[in-house]
């Protein structure tokens, strides 16, 4: 299945997707310049579940919907606890109240 990647490319213009014991390369192609790559149908849902990849064509979209229905899930990430969600090491840091940690109290001199 051909997928498009929304992650920013590395300096060499590619994104590597590691699924199982293989890596799949996404590189710019087509008139749109989107990062595209081929992933086996058996592993495509794992890539789609990250919310960083989506089907490249209407045919791939229909196939993804069929695979999702066959899996019996109503949504890719539905029912997963936050700790079960995929971690993106390239994600920007969390800002705001969630990112603030308590600083240890300063010792008085």
Image (cartoon, helix red, strand yellow):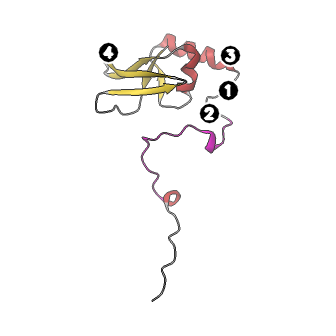
Residue hosting label 2: 77
Task: Give the residue at x 31% y 21%.
Answer: 33
Q: Residues within 10 Å of mark 2 (few under 14, many from 20)?
A: some
Residue, far front: 21
Q: CA distance from mark 3 to mark 4?
A: 31 Å
How packed mark 1 is, by other alpha carbons closer than 10 Å (few <14, some 14-19, many 20 or more), is: few
Residue occupied by mark 1: 74
Circle 4 sits in a helix, a strand or a loop, which is it?
A: loop
Q: Is residue 63 magenta?
A: no
Q: Secondary structure at mark 1?
A: loop
Q: Which residues are magenta?
A: 79-96
Residues under numbered marks 1 and 2 in contact, where contact means CB atoms less than 8 Å apart: no
Tell me the SS state at disc 3.
helix
How much space separates mark 1 and mark 2, taking CA atoms? 9 Å
Residue 90: in magenta span: yes
Give the label, 1 or 3, closer to the camera. 3
The residue carrying pointer 3 sits among few (fewer than 14), some (14 to 19) or many (20 or more) residues within 10 Å by Cα, namely few
Please state the horizontal and vertical placement of residue 102, each as a whole percent of the image.
53, 68
The C terminus is located in which quarter?
bottom left
Residue beneath the point at 62% across and 33% down: 77
The image shows residue 95 at horizontal and vertical percentages of: 45, 55
Question: Is the residue under label 3 in contact with that under label 1 (CB below 8 Å)?
Answer: no
Q: Residue at x 47, y 58 (%)?
A: 96
Query: Looking at the picture, how far across and down is residue 73, in whole percent?
Result: 68, 25
């Amino acid at each position: 299945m051909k997928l498009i990647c929304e992650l920013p490319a590395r300096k060499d213009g590619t994104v590597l997707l590691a699924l199982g014991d293989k890596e799949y390369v996404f590189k710019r192609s087509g008139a749109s310049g989107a990062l595209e790559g081929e992933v086996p149908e058996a592993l495509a849902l794992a890539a789609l579940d990250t919310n960083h990849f989506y089907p490249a064509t209407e045919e791939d979209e229909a196939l993804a919907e069929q695979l999702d229905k066959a899996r019996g899930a109503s949504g890719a990430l539905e029912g997963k606890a936050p700790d079960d969600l995929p971690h993106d090491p390239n994600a920007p840091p969390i800002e705001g109240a969630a990112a603030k940690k308590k600083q240890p109290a300063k010792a008085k001199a």
